[in-house]
Amino acid sequence: MKDLSRRDFLKFLGIGAVGLAARPRIASALKHGLAPAVFASDVVQCFHEEATSGNTINEPVVQMMMDESVMALAGVRDVGEAWKSFFPGITEASIIGIKINCINRYLPTHPEVARSMVNGLAQMNFGGTLFPKNNIIVWDRTDSELTSSGYTIYTGSDPSQVRYVGTNHSGFGYDTGVTFNVNGSNQNPSRILSQMVDYLVDAAVLKTHSQGNVTLCMKNHYGSVHNPGGLQHSSGCSPAIPSLNQQIRDVVTPNNIQKLFVIDGLFGLYSGGPGGSPNFNPKVLIMSRDPVACDYQGQNVINIERRARGLGTLNAAQITTAAQPPYSLGTTDVNLIEINNVGIEEGGRTARERRLEVSPQPVREQARISFGIPSAGDVSIDLVDAAGRTRAEVYRGRLARGRHQVNWQARGKVGAGTYFLRLSSRGGTQAKKITVLSKE
């Protein structure tokens, strides 16, 4: 599995394939104090067949995918603790930025993906104090681009809410006191990047680019500076993209604030990007601590689709150059960890003990919900629709480790339709699709 994952990057396992692939034990560069390119970098790729239904994103499933990906990458089976592990020295007063990509309103970093990250970050616990959502800034270039992509701009009226803003929002803007020298082009970064956040998550989109071949995590930062049109787009955006990302790593204070790179691959563009409507539906999230490795695997997913359609493969110069001196931003040697359809059909004793089950199906008047949790803690079960809206609170409470059963009266609570039961605990999130019938 190790050799296939690293060299051939097998296609997503077929429908019904499940679980977390065996993790190859390759020493990390960080543990050994060596240059990033010496050892393979972990990349988590999570596929779920129910992540989307037609053009609709099933947010409870996306939340589950995000939680499982974060825990797999961190090697920690607690969502909040897994997120904390990415941010050394973090406190409840720290500020986390999530740089999204909204230049194409038909294919942005989807709000459902952003919310799944926010919800995970809000599970970080500091001595009984949960991380405040208001300490999270989700941002891109302009308020209008965020709005057209489905985000609601933060107005300051609710301090318990995440801050969705564009750099052009009042009180933000660009930092004229910091200048990046990007391959000869002087660029001022967003003040969000240079002054306001302690840590950064780069949340990009899976798509091609007419000049850069692909536009993924590293190119996402063209939206982090004041004059992206002044940056080089020829020669595969190389060395402009590596140069910009090197400047962000080395010039922004505190240095190296970027800690996680995520590619939203629920939908994508295998050709014709960066504009236009999506033309394929990978239903994946890709995640790594290494921007080069993350983009390399994103390019691979695009190339799988291109080969299937008889198109030539892409080999973006920006990715190759970024891995080399003087930039040394990461490696193209990828240690691929695949998660497939978690929560639908899992094997092994531990998985069976944790499985979320509903009986009878479909539900008419009442249902028996059984589930397992890996450790004692707070548990919530919600009934949510495909858009992620909570339609009913099924259970709230603190439970011991092990399997449990909850009886739920469905009649009179919701109308007939298809929903998801979402179970949240310290062990992550599970989701189960159910059908509720009207009373005959």
Image (spheres, rainbow, N blue to C red):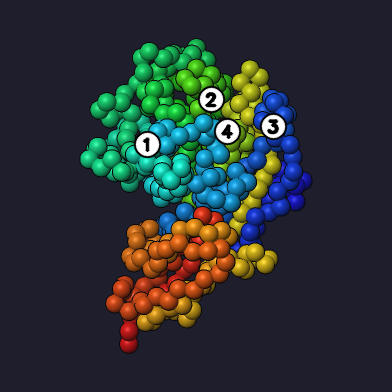
- Judging by the rendered image, the residue that carries numbered circle 1 is 135
Of residues 263 and 426, the one drawn nearer to the viewer in this rendering: 426
Residue found 63% across the figure and 59% down from its top: 19
The alpha-carbon separation of the residues under discs 1 and 4 comes to 24 Å
- Judging by the rendered image, the residue that carries numbered circle 2 is 256
Q: Which mark is residue 31?
A: 3
* Residue 60 position in % (x across, y down): 44, 58
Horizontally, is 437 left or right of 68 in the view?
Answer: left
Question: Mark 4 vs mark 2: which is more N-terminal?
Answer: 2
**Secondary-structure class at tag 3:** helix
Q: Amino acid at mark 4?
A: Pro
Looking at the image, the residue that sits furthest to the right is 3
Q: Is residue 81 above or below residue 333?
A: below
Q: Nearer the viewer, mark 1 or mark 4?
A: 1
Dot 4, how many residues are within 10 Å of its Cα: few (below 14), some (14-19), or many (20+)?
many
Residue found 46% across the figure and 42% down from its top: 127
The alpha-carbon separation of the residues under discs 4 and 2 comes to 12 Å
Residue found 52% across the figure and 49% down from its top: 79
Q: Amino acid at mark 3?
A: Lys
* Residue 68 position in % (x across, y down): 56, 52
Dot 2, how many residues are within 10 Å of its Cα: few (below 14), some (14-19), or many (20+)?
some
Q: Nearer the viewer, mark 4 or mark 3?
A: 3
Q: Nearer the viewer, mark 3 or mark 2?
A: 3
Question: Mark 3 vs mark 1: which is more N-terminal?
Answer: 3
Question: Mark 4 vs mark 3: which is more N-terminal?
Answer: 3
Question: Mark 3 vs mark 2: which is more N-terminal?
Answer: 3
Is residue 278 visible in this depiction of the protein? no
Q: Quadrant of residue 118?
A: top left
